[in-house]
Structure formats: structure tokens, C-alpha cells
């Protein structure tokens, strides 16, 4: 069985590699993003609730979040909620996507509310736009940024060029876009066209589909458990 290409940030990729190893699958790691804290401070004021759309939003937030941990926190993704709980927040509404959590928030807060959003610098606008359109205020504090890698890992380049990669795992739309840009620059876009691509969600799959890739599969739910289950199903 050929290895699977994992395109996550270093620490996340290492955890995914362990899970793949437990499934009897080898992996090649090529982080296309580096996640770094910004040190951004939370503006003073009263907030009705906090929002987090990724675990990094709570893991890399500054120490000044301590004063806000009495707020209910609404999270996108079970992993995000777990990270929030581990750091003393009180997870309340949890849903798998911005599209899924938005109507739940609008139902919970029928009157204008002020939300503290612990976010990344690069993100989709669905959640903020939807809340603001309904009269709410969202204070987005960009606590981390995802810096694009300048190149794919040499081991990954060699494996792709030699047709030794069986599948690739994609966890974000931006990482998929960066991967394609780097592959195009190396002249190996045709080699990765024949690889089976597994995307965390329809949104993540968009750059791959736009490139015309035919072998793109999307997880039933946007979490790693369902992504790896989809991969395991294909392997068997």
C-alpha cells in the first residue's frame, strides 16, 4: 500500500500520522501551513458570548482571555469545543460548520448581542456576516495566523514525482490552495491529478474540484474521525 500525504501544520500532522499508523497506513508529512500566535489583545468591554471556529483559536489565545472565561462559548466542531473545555471555557452550542451553527445562534439570541470571536487571520466570513446581518456585533480578535509554506517537503516531492503517493488528506481550503500552488510551481500538477484526494468538507474540496481533479471524496461530517473513516473505507 502506498503512503498517504498529510498536508497539515507540523503538530497536527504528527497526530494524524499516529492515527494513520493505527490503521496500518504509512504517511508522508508535508506541512503547507505554519500556525503562529499573533499576541492580539482582547478589547475591553462587555460581551454576551464567545465564538471559536477552530481549536487554535483557544489554544493560541493570549493570557488576557482568562477574564472572559465565564462567558458561554459557542464552537464550530467537537475538537474545538474540547480544546475550549480543557482551557476552562464553558462550551455551549456546538455544531459542525458555520452554516450549521448560525441558525442556532440566531435562535438563542433573538435580540442584538455582542460576541467575542477568537479567530484566525484567514477565515471564511459566513459566521460574522450572518450574525452582523441580523443586528449582532462581532468583535473578531485574530489570535493566530497560518503562514504559507514556501515549498513542499523534499520527501513529498520525490514521492509525488515517482507516483508513490496513494492519497492526500486536505483539512482546509487554504491549505489545499497552497498545496496546488506549490505543486504547480514544481511542475508536478499532473502527478497529483491521479492521486485520490480526501477533503474535510465541501468547502475544502473546492480548490481541488476547480482544478478539475476527478478523484475527490468529501467526509460525511467535517471532522478527522469521518475523514479517516472515509479513507479506511476506500483502503478496504
Image: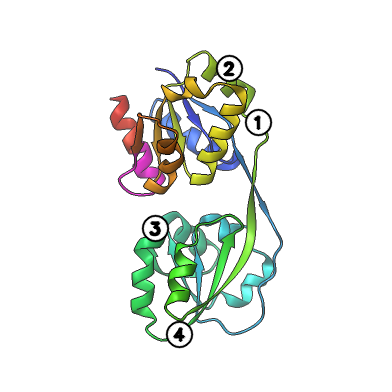
Give the mark, 4 or 1, whose residue is nearer the N terminus.
Answer: 4
Q: Which mark is residue 112?
A: 4
Q: Does residue 125 sit above or below 218 in this rendering?
A: below
> Do the numbered discs 2 and 4 sit on residues whose CB atoms are within 8 Å?
no
Q: CA distance from mark 3 to mark 4?
A: 22 Å
Residue hosting label 2: 158
Question: What residue sits 58% from the left and 17% below the top?
Answer: 158
Question: What residue sits 45% from the left and 81% below the top?
Answer: 135
Give the mark, 3 or 2, whose residue is nearer the N terminus.
Answer: 3
Density class for disc 2 (Cα within 10 Å; few <14, some 14-19, many ≥20) is: few
Give the mark, 1 or 2, whose residue is nearer the N terminus.
Answer: 1
Q: CA distance from mark 3 to mark 1?
A: 30 Å
> Do the numbered discs 1 and 2 sit on residues whose CB atoms are within 8 Å?
no
Q: Give the structural element (helix, strand or loop) at label 1.
A: loop
Q: Which mark is residue 97?
A: 3
Q: CA distance from mark 3 to mark 2?
A: 35 Å
Residue hosting label 1: 151
Density class for disc 3 (Cα within 10 Å; few <14, some 14-19, many ≥20) is: some
Q: CA distance from mark 1 to mark 2?
A: 13 Å
Give the mark, 3 or 4, whose residue is nearer the N terminus.
Answer: 3
Q: Position of residue 82 (x, y in %)?
A: 46, 59
Q: CA distance from mark 2 to mark 4?
A: 54 Å
Q: Give residue 149's quadrant in the image.
A: top right
Give the mark, 2 or 4, whose residue is nearer the N terminus.
Answer: 4
> Do the numbered discs 3 and 4 sit on residues whose CB atoms are within 8 Å?
no
Q: Position of residue 81 (x, y in %)?
A: 45, 61
Q: Position of residue 211 (x, y in %)?
A: 45, 34
Looking at the rendering, the stretch of residues picked out in magenta corresponds to 218-228
Amino acid at each position: 500500500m502506498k503512503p498517504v500525504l498529510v498536508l497539515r501544520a507540523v503538530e497536527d500532522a504528527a497526530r494524524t500520522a499516529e492515527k494513520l499508523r493505527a490503521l496500518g497506513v504509512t504517511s508522508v508529512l508535508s506541512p503547507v501551513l505554519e500556525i503562529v500566535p499573533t499576541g492580539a489583545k482582547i478589547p475591553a468591554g462587555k460581551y454576551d458570548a464567545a465564538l471559536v471556529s477552530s481549536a487554535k483559536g483557544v489554544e493560541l489565545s493570549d493570557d488576557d482571555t482568562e477574564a472572559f472565561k465565564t462567558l458561554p462559548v459557542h464552537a464550530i466542531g467537537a475538537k474545538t469545543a474540547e480544546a475550549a473545555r480543557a482551557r476552562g471555557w464553558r462550551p455551549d452550542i456546538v455544531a459542525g460548520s458555520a452554516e450549521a451553527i448560525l441558525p442556532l445562534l440566531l435562535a438563542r439570541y433573538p435580540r442584538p448581542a455582542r460576541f467575542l470571536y477568537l479567530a484566525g487571520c484567514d477565515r471564511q466570513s459566513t459566521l460574522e456576516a450572518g450574525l452582523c446581518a441580523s443586528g449582532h456585533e462581532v468583535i473578531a480578535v485574530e489570535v493566530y495566523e497560518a503562514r504559507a509554506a514556501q515549498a513542499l517537503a523534499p520527501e513529498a516531492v520525490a514521492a509525488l514525482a515517482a507516483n508513490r503517493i496513494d492519497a492526500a488528506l486536505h483539512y482546509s481550503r487554504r491549505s489545499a490552495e497552497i498545496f496546488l500552488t506549490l505543486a504547480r510551481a514544481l511542475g508536478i500538477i499532473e502527478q497529483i491529478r491521479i492521486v485520490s484526494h480526501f477533503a474535510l468538507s465541501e468547502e475544502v474540496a473546492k480548490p481541488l474540484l476547480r482544478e478539475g481533479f476527478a478523484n475527490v471524496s468529501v467526509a460525511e461530517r467535517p471532522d478527522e474521525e469521518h475523514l479517516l473513516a472515509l479513507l479506511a473505507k476506500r483502503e478496504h
